[in-house]
Image: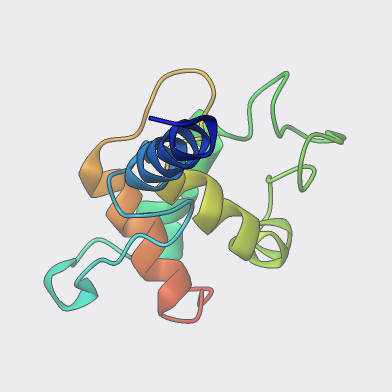
Amino acid sequence: MNKTSVTVAVISLVVLLSSSCSKDGGGGGGTTTVDCSTVSNKAFAADVNPIIQSTCAISGCHASGSTNGPGALTSYTEIFNARTNIRSAVSSGRMPQTGSLSTSQKNSIICWIDGGAPNN
């Protein structure tokens, strides 16, 4: 093999490996698709807010006064305004940084956001 062939082979391998890997297995950061018609636990007050308050709106992360990422996530308005960032971070597995969410918890958040993020 000549030097050009080796270079092309190495670049091809790097592209193949980097495009085939993602933490969530969904093909790319934040693009997870969920069949929300099968998810029943997607109400803000009963399902989504408790998850966010116990895993995100904690000291050192997104508690009151936080400047991390989208800032504090302590109220409906703050969460609603950060919904795009939240969806991306949750579906890619980047957040929460301490621990992880179950598939059911991730689906609740994703489907709530995909459903228009109502204050229900």
56 to 58, vertically: above or below = below
User: Foreground: 23 or 8?
Assistant: 8
Image quadrant for the C terminus? Answer: bottom left
Q: Give the residue at x 72% y 66%.
A: 81
In the image, residue 65 lies at what x, y percent?
A: 87, 35
In the image, residue 39 lies at what x, y percent? 18, 66
Q: Residue at x 57, y 52 (%)?
A: 86
Q: Farthest front residue?
A: 2
Is residue 100 found left or right of 59 in the rendered image? left
Left or right: 80 with respect to 7? right
Q: Estimate the x, y position of residue 102 in percent, counting from the top left.
A: 26, 36
* Residue 66 location (% of width, % of height): 83, 33
Q: Quadrant of the N terminus?
A: top left
- Relative to 63, is 80 above or below? below
Residue 33 visible in the picture: yes
Residue 12 appears in which quarter of the rendering? top left
- Name the residue nearer the viewer: 111 or 32: 32
The number of numbered badges drawn on the structure is: 0
Horizontal side of residue 15 vs 107, given as left or right? right
Foreground pick, 79 / 5: 5
Seen in the picture, residue 96 relative to 114 is either above or below; the reply is: above
Residue at position x 27%, y 45% in the image = 25
Q: Is residue 46 visible?
A: no
Of residues 11 and 1, the one nearer the viewer is: 1
The structure residue drawn at horizontal position 18% and vertical position 67%, both measured from the top left corner, is 40
